[in-house]
Amino acid sequence: MRIQLKISNVLRLSLLFGLVWLCLGMAGFFGWKRVSAEVGQRAQAEAGFAVAAAAQRLAQADQLFAARARAEAGSLRTAAMRGGAPRMFQGQGEPFLTFGRGVARKPVAERVAARSGGAAMILVLSGDVFTPVDSSLKTAAGAPALLDGIGPSSPYQKLLRAGRPAEGPVRVDSHAYYASFLPIKSQGSATIGAFGGLYPLEGLDEITRELRESPVFAHGFLVAADNRDEVGFSALGVVPAWLATHLKEVNQGGEIQGAVLDGYAITRSPEAKSGLRVIAGVSQSDVAFSTIKLVGAALTFLAMVIVVALCLAWLLARRLTEALAQAERSRVEAEAAQAALTKELDQAARYVQSLLPEPTRQGPVGANWLYRPSAGLGGDAFGYHWLDDNRFAFYLLDVCGHGVGAALLATTVMNVIRAQTVQADFANPSSVLAALNDAFPMAEQNDMYFTMWYGVYDAGAQQVRYASGGHHPAILIAPDGQTWLLQGKGAAIGCFKGVQYPVFDLAAPAGARLYVFSDGLFEVERKQAKDMLTFDEFVGIIVNWRRQHPDRELGHVLETIQEIQGKLAFDDDCSLVEVSFRPTGQVRLVA
């Protein structure tokens, strides 16, 4: 009888433990499915966030840095080529370049980069690899920093070897940069090297660090592919071998969001204007490994507390809310990145303001100005400087639209004029406008163009020579109130090839003042009547203001326009430059 009781107790105990472990197994099975789905969603969310963040950074790079990288490479080419035609020589070690009698190892790149705030390098084609021989980026030992990935399989090398420029994201010593490369050709037209202009993309480095710390990206990848179906950049340094075969399908195929190819869940961004598309792949094995770790920990905990095993097993999915917390952290990080971008835009606005010239009140020519962008960054730019002891150049340009893209184009043009990096006679307004029209075609500037008024005052001849590219007339006011409109004839800069810009001359009297301005000052809507202020009315405001208040500051004009439109903010960028001529003379039309 006791034996039977013992056996029955053992049977009951075995049945109890069997039921418990059966429940644990069922809980583990259903918990596995819930956790797998949760982890998979988290992995997909992380991939989507990484793709969106990387695509946004590349789009910002194309908008913020593409024009500056191209200008950087062009400035480097101009500085290096001053020494003469390039030639390549094979030394005892690496080959080297010479420009005339100068050797490329002289720090030309450092001088160019110091003026622009970016980075520059000169590379020589050594075998199948472009190797830097002069770079503003240095290793810890002081040698030129090495480019990652400009080898025989790089799409940039294919373009450079074909004698064509190349640009896009690159890595230098594991740091991300946006680069523009121009080929260096020998006298036989063979590519022997390249000029490079680069700007850092700290945002992509930050994304790379975050992905490497993510368990579901341990074996994943994030690449930027161009519209030629070639990988130009890898954020994680991992490019699966099968991607070379399937890249066209992944890059140009139809709907693929969330699809699985060769063990990877694929996420991609739309194609950007630059032709780049960001593609990310989360390894399914990483998702499974993360799931195993989570479920294993949960089952171990359930085994230790069998009494509450059934409840804990069914509540496993609820306890695993870390994925939702990760999504919240991603949102916070995105807001921090946006705040960093806003800070960068503020810095860019201060940089643009720093480029504007100081007012001058001494000597035969005085100059003063007012500037009011409609947003933090504007598309207006202007400047003035003495070409020599006798000739004073002054100009104003207005890029279509406003914001980051317009401001970058405006500052690039202003820097080109200040550094005189285009082939032009800067004392001849026609030559300057024609050279800028050739250097900045709108097809290469994100479909942006600009209008421009350019003048040169000859103090000896007491004469203004000017030309206009699609810009409205400037105003010349004599001391007696007589007024001339200085109208030019020529299309806006960048719209058409081979445009001719006629030059006009006008003599100026003692005490005359000349006003050049952007259309944001007069293309305003009246606060009461729903019509626009006319150009002639604006000219009347300028003339009457100077006749009645010859000594008042330029801000009075701004206040008058603000009163007309009934608000302080302007819908477009506003610029006004006043140039006063102090030598004596009489006004006459020169022809």
Image (cartoon, helix red, strand yellow):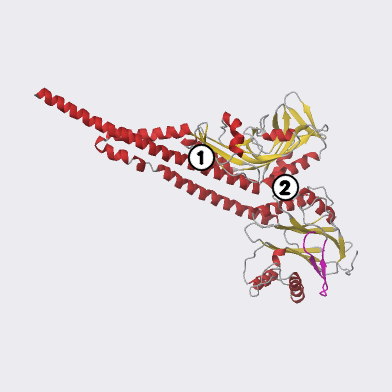
Q: Bounds of the magenta span?
A: 469-488
Give the number of marks: 2
Name the residue: 76% across, 73% down.
540
Name the residue: 47% across, 33% down.
284
Quadrant of the snapshot with the C terminus: bottom right
* Secondary structure state at the residue bearing disc 2: helix
- Of all residues, the one furthest to the right in this rendering is 591
Residue beneath disc 2: 444
**Observer-nearest residue: 550 or 198?**
198
Q: Is residue 45 visible?
A: yes
- Label 1 is placed on what type of residue? Gly
Residue beneath disc 1: 258
Quadrant of the snapshot with the N terminus: top left
Query: Residue 462: where, in percent of width, then height?
Result: 87, 64
Vertical placement of residue 308 versus 151, above or below: below
Residue 180's quadrant in the figure? Answer: top right
Vertical placement of residue 96 versus 591, above or below: above
Crowd tier of the residue under label 2, counting other residues whose Cα lies within 10 Å: few below 14, some 14–19, many 20 or above: few
- Label 2 is placed on what type of residue? Glu
Q: Tell me the mark number nearer the camera, choosing from 1 and 2.
A: 1
Residue 461's quadrant in the figure? Answer: bottom right
Q: Is residue 456 visible?
A: no
Q: Is residue 289 magenta?
A: no
Query: Residue 315: where, in percent of width, then height?
Result: 32, 41
Name the residue: 42% across, 39% down.
37
Name the residue: 34% across, 40% down.
316
Residue 84's quadrant in the figure? Answer: top right
First-in-chain label (1 vs 2): 1
* Secondary structure state at the residue bearing disc 1: loop
